[in-house]
Image (cartoon, rainbow, N blue to C red):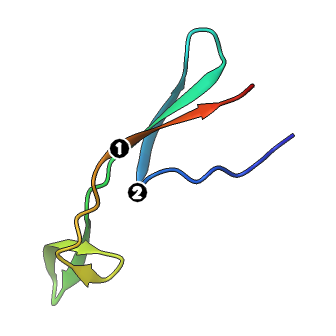
Amino acid sequence: MIIDVEVGYLPDMLTFTPDGSKILVANEGEPEYKEFDGEKVSGYYNGTPDNDPKGSISIISLY
């Protein structure tokens, strides 16, 4: 069975627990960099200024 699971902002890396029962996902939560007039500007996420999503982890149980 394949399912979609929502995790946090900007999932960056995943690993399985040693017993294989869970997946651990690291969510960066960093704002994207947008380019305006050839200059990179930070602090933009989904086009909204000053919205800096928090980093988090997601724990997904497989059984």
The amino acid type, in three-letter code, at marker 2 is: Tyr
SS assignment at label 1: strand
Position of 41 relative to 9 (above/below): below
Residue lying farthest to the bottom in this orientation: 37
Q: Where on the picture, by quarter, is residue 16? A: top right
Quickly name the residue at label 2.
Answer: 9
Q: Amino acid at mark 1?
A: Ser
Secondary structure at badge 2 equals loop
Q: Quadrant of residue 9?
A: bottom left
Instruction: Tell me where residue 62 sits by quadrant.
Output: top right
Q: Is residue 50 left or right of residue 17?
A: left
**Which residue reaches farthest top?**
19
Seen at 32% across and 48% down, the residue is: 28
The number of numbered discs placed on residues in the rendered structure image is 2
Q: Is residue 61 above or below residue 18?
A: below
Read off the residue under disc 1: 56
Quarter containing the N terminus: top right
Compared with 12, 52 (above or below) is below
Q: Residues within 10 Å of mark 1 (few under 14, many from 20)?
A: some
Q: Position of residue 36 (x, y in %)?
A: 18, 87
Residue positioned 61% across, 24% down in the render: 22
- Seen at 31% across and 54% down, the residue is 29
Mark 1 and mark 2 residues within 8 Å of each other at the beta carbon: yes
Mark closer to the chain start, 1 or 2: 2
Residue 19 x/y as whole percent: 63, 9
Tell me residue 42's x, y (percent). 15, 70
The C terminus appears in which quarter of the rendering? top right
